Image (cartoon, helix red, strand yellow):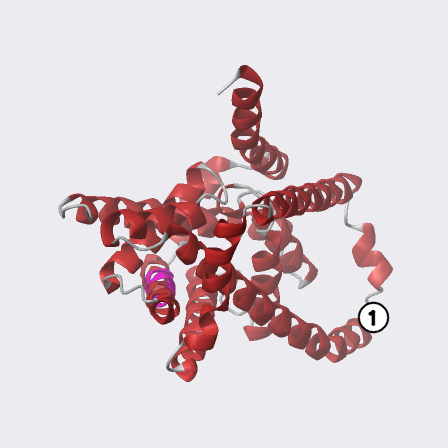
């Protein structure tokens, strides 16, 4: 590998951390961390927080089960636990190198079960498309359902939408613009990579088989159930954290689903587990719904930190578990 490629690779790894770190620094530059520590140690309901983590685990479990089902039509029959371990490790690896999880989990099945790497990658592409369509559908429903609620809210309070937007600082607009630019660049680079891969006929043939694997799934209703279960788990994983704090426990389902959707979309910006863009997006929505700025900032930092900490724990567990078994010859 020449020096230019090494520099490019290093830049690709460093940029997401710089972007996420920059947004976090801007958001928390004036934060009273002593007060934040008091909230974590004394004011937060740890029972609800720990219970919410259960659904962070079930989301990944259902993803592993669904993945095994997608692989079977291609004659690939990996062990169920290997699929689950691969998913656990993929999320953990994405914390180190954003978007590397898709490749790592396919590599694990290839190593331990002899599965075709390219076919597995094709099924991952299929999964992403299905998940994106589901999120798009939910987003559309939420937006349409919120039109009347927003109008009613503004009528009752006499609040002008221009007054709300005026509270959105110039720096806030700049951060939003930067996130959008990074997202567009990331999608452009991704499309170029797929264009390059399209030139390799054999590779694309195997990937195509994986992408079209859904046609051969035996029980499509169960596949649909697993898909819904994945996202229901993610949502409950997030929603339960509202019960952890006095300032969010009375926020309703509407606030939860809107902030969840916005947060889910924001993680397309390639930073480790959405750090930075997720904080900014969810905090903005909570403030628009009336939560105090300091409370919103506290909420997103604590919730994201604790839920992100679960990811390496599961990844290490799976690395240890796989390390105790032989590699597929």
Q: Would you say the magenta stretch is mainly helix, strand or loop?
A: helix
Q: Is residue 276 above or below residue 137?
A: above
From the top left corner, tell me how far across and down residue 39 is, in percent.
Answer: 43, 48
Q: Say if residue 40 shows up in the picture.
A: no
Q: Quadrant of residue 44?
A: bottom left
What residue sits right under mark 1 in the picture? 158
Residue drawn where x is 75% and y is 76% of the image: 147
Query: Which image quadrant is residue 71 in?
Result: bottom left
Question: Considering only vertical position in the picture, is 101 above or below 265?
Answer: above
Query: Magenta residues, as a range?
Result: 56-63
How many numbered marks are there? Answer: 1
Residue lying at the far top in this picture: please name it. Answer: 3
Residue 232 at x, y percent in the picture: 45, 72
Q: Is residue 173 left or right of residue 319?
A: right
The structure residue drawn at horizontal position 82% and vertical position 76%, both measured from the top left corner, is: 155
> Residue 171 or 325: which is nearer the viewer?
325
Q: Is residue 201 magenta?
A: no
Q: Residue at point 60% right, 43% down?
A: 196
Number of residues whose C-alpha sits closer than 10 Å to that of mark 1, classed few (under 14), some (14–19) or many (20 or more): few
Return the x and y of residue 2 as percentages of the image width and height: 52, 17
> Residue at horizontal 60%, vertical 73%?
138
Q: Position of residue 109 (x, y in %)?
A: 30, 53
Q: Is residue 257 above or below residue 91?
A: below
């Amino acid at each position: 590998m020449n020096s230019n490629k090494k520099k490019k690779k290093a830049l690709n790894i460093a940029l997401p951390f710089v972007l996420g770190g920059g947004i976090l620094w801007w958001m928390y530059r004036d934060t009273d961390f002593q007060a934040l520590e008091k909230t974590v140690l004394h004011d937060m309901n740890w029972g609800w927080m720990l219970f919410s983590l259960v659904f962070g685990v079930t989301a990944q479990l259902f993803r592993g089960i669904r993945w095994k089902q997608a692989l079977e039509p291609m004659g690939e029959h990996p062990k169920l636990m290997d699929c689950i371990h691969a998913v656990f490790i993929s999320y953990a690896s994405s914390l180190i190198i954003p978007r590397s999880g898709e490749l790592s989990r396919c590599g694990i099945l290839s190593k331990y079960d002899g599965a075709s790497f390219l076919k597995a990658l094709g099924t991952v592409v299929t999964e992403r498309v299905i998940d994106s369509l589901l999120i798009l559908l939910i987003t559309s429903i939420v937006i349409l359902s919120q039109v009347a609620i927003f109008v009613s809210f503004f009528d009752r309070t006499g609040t002008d939408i221009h007054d709300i937007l005026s509270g959105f600082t110039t720096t806030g607009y700049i951060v939003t613009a930067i996130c959008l630019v990074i997202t567009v660049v990331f999608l452009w680079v991704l499309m170029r990579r797929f264009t390059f891969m399209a030139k390799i006929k054999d590779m694309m043939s195997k990937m195509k088989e994986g992408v079209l694997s859904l046609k051969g799934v035996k029980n499509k209703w169960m596949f649909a159930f697993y898909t819904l279960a994945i996202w229901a788990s993610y949502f409950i994983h997030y929603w339960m954290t509202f019960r952890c704090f006095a300032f969010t426990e009375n926020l309703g389902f509407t606030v939860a689903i809107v902030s969840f959707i916005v947060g889910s979309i924001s993680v397309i910006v390639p930073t480790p587990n959405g750090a930075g863009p997720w904080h900014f997006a969810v905090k903005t929505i909570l403030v628009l719904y009336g939560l105090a700025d300091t409370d919103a900032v506290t909420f997103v930092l604590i919730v994201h930190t604790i839920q992100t900490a679960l990811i390496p724990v599961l990844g290490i567990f799976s690395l240890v578990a796989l390390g105790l078994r032989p590699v597929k010859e």
